[in-house]
Amino acid sequence: MIIKELVTILDTIAPFFLQENYDNSGVQFADLEEKVQRALLCLDVTGETIQEATEKKCNVIIAHHPLFFLPLNRITKQNNPIVYQLLYNRLNLIAFHTNFDLSENGLNDYFGKLLGLKKIDCLEESAEKTLKLAVYVPAQYHEKLLEALFQAGAGNIGHYSETSFSASGKGSFKPLEGTKPFIGKTGERKSVLETKIETVFQERDLNRVIDAIYQNHPYEEPAYDIYHLKTNSKTGIGLLAQLPSGQKLTDICQKIKDDLGIPYLRVVQTAKQKIGTIALCTGSGGSLLEQAIQKKADLFITGDIKHHEALRARETGLNIIDIEHFYTERYFVPALKERLVGAGFPKKLLLASEKMNPPFQLFQ
């Protein structure tokens, strides 16, 4: 497998176009035609992870956080030591950041499952469009085209797959000069018994769905319509979960520490001690504080909460458990490994970094 094919798999798992405006996910430095020898999965690109990659004979690093957010005018070993090491060792780098944060079965969903949370909603909907297809095909080609559309990613609604609606009717057309009609004759109007197929798909699958139509439809010019649906999507950044019964904030804190091996937590505690609804955002979730408040969460689990955000939360009765940024996002590695293997990437070529450490240490 070459790096370009790996990028395609990643784009299928969590499309790069969904990333936040400030982000720079995607290929950061690569020879797209180079064969993947081994890929190291890590949270951040550091001197330690670069050394680890070279020692383990990896030629690809897939990091959660981009190394390049802003353009660099010059690169020197003295001022940009990490960038210099990456380029010097010819390590191909791909960042897989906010697009994976907000994707279905992405980092937030993975971390939520570790905490035993059942997702009922997201905190902020994804910008990805849900589309509806209507395509007309001769009745005898209905099943063939329908199967191809499902294989292209169409037909998924919630926990149901291969959903569609079909109706029969008459289609008419008159082939003009220069055409090669599958049915009928040039210059004569023809009526044909056709089946109308309706199904839904996500924007990420648009090109595959259109390709499926042209590759499996007998007509020279297939007739189809694509509509943008206004739906209540549960795909987006963060998640909302409902506990089966109200639990104490202190018990939730202790469970997080015990289950995940986290050394300390910062807590904003309000008078609301019974927790029913939990909002969650891995990494730095301060920008989603208002969404957590609007969705009437009792508790917001995230990281990097600032002083005034903490005051705002306390004023509105929103408890906060601030888990250090590193301790929520270190699970990027097992989460992405699981998805890549599920997508057919060879497991033996994926290595989990053993050199990831939080930048902060406790002084006691």
Image (cartoon, helix red, strand yellow):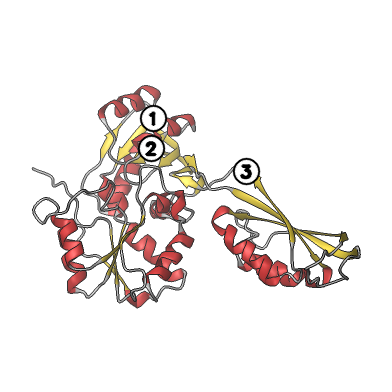
**Residue visible at 39% across and 26% down?**
317
Q: Give residue 318's mark.
A: 1
Labels 3 and 1: the sequence-earlier one: 3
Q: Which of 267 and 210 lies nearest the eye of the viewer?
A: 210
- The answer to which image quadrant residue 36 occupies is bottom left
Horizontal arrangement in the rendering, residue 329 relative to residue 180 (left or right): left
Reading the chain from its start, which is encountered first: label 2 or label 1? 2
Q: CA distance from mark 3 to mark 1?
A: 28 Å
Amino acid of disc 3: Thr
- Crowding around mark 1 (Cα neighbors within 10 Å: few <14, some 14 to 19, many 20+) is many
Q: Residue at x 72, y 69 (%)?
A: 145
Which residue was labeled with disc 2? Answer: 300
Disc 3: which residue: 231
The earlier-in-sequence mark between 2 and 3 is 3
- Disc 2 + disc 3, Cβ < 8 Å: no
Confirm or deny contact between disc 2 and disc 1 (CB under 8 A). Answer: yes
Residue visible at 62% across and 56% down in the picture: 201
Under circle 1, the secondary element is: loop
80 displayed left or right of 230 = left
Q: Secondary structure at mark 3?
A: loop
Where does residue 313 sit, x and y in percent of width and height? 35, 27
Instruction: State the image coordinates of residue 322 (x, y, percent, origin top left).
Output: 29, 39
Asked if 306 appears above or below 39 in the picture, the reply is above
Specify the amino acid type for callout 1.
Leu
Residue 335 location, x and y as percent? 38, 60
Mark 3 nearby-residue class (10 Å; few <14, some 14–19, many ≥20):
few
**Disc 2 from disc 3: Cα separation:** 26 Å
Residue 95, quarter of the rendered image: bottom left
Viewer-closest of 19 and 285: 19
Residue 59 visible, this angle = yes
